[in-house]
């Protein structure tokens, strides 16, 4: 099965509580921006491990490559404020 950006968004949101996910990609390579309160206090590596855990075996079977940017809601707010 070829995964779609919508599939990946749904998988992450279902398995990573209170997350906001944006995915783009071509069916093999995907880019993700994931905002989740559960990332607070975690290192970037730990945040990525949480996303990989949420995707489970799909990372081996359905997704060839996933580039991700993870942040807390506070990080997103700070980023938005800087951009303005």
Image: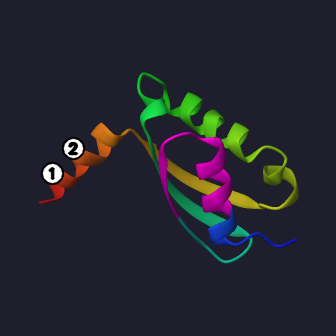
What is the quadrant of residue 17 in the picture?
top right
Residue 65 got which mark?
none
Closer to the camera, 13 or 34? 13
Q: Which residues are magenta?
A: 8-22
Q: Answer yes or no: do the residues labelled 2 and 1 have beta carbons within 8 Å? A: yes
Residue 78 got which mark?
2
| 29 sits to left or right of 32 | right
Q: Residue at x 82, y 62 (%)?
A: 62
Measured from the top left, where is residue 24 in percent x and y? 56, 71
Tell me if residue 12 is in the magenta stretch. Answer: yes
Q: Residue at x 66, y 43 (%)?
A: 15
Which element type, helix, strand or loop, lies under badge 1?
helix
Looking at the rendered image, the quarter that the C terminus falls into is bottom left
Q: Is residue 24 above or below residue 52?
A: below
| 19 sits to left or right of 50 | left
Measured from the top left, where is residue 36 in percent x and y? 45, 41
| 43 sits to left or right of 61 | left
Q: Outermost residue toward the top?
A: 41
Measured from the top left, where is residue 65 in percent x and y? 71, 59
Q: Is residue 34 above or below residue 53?
A: below
Give the spatial CA distance, label 2 vs label 1: 6 Å
Tell me if residue 20 is in the magenta stretch. Answer: yes
Q: Residue at x 38, y 38 (%)?
A: 72
- Give the labeled residue for mark 1: 82
């Amino acid at each position: 099965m070829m995964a779609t950006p919508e599939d990946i968004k749904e998988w992450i949101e279902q398995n990573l509580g209170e997350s906001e996910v944006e995915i783009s990609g071509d069916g093999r390579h995907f880019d993700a921006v994931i905002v989740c309160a559960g990332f607070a206090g975690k290192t970037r590596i730990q945040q990525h491990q949480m996303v990989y855990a949420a995707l489970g075996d799909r990372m081996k079977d359905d997704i060839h490559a996933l580039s991700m940017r993870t942040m807390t809601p506070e990080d997103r707010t700070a980023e938005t404020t800087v951009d303005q």
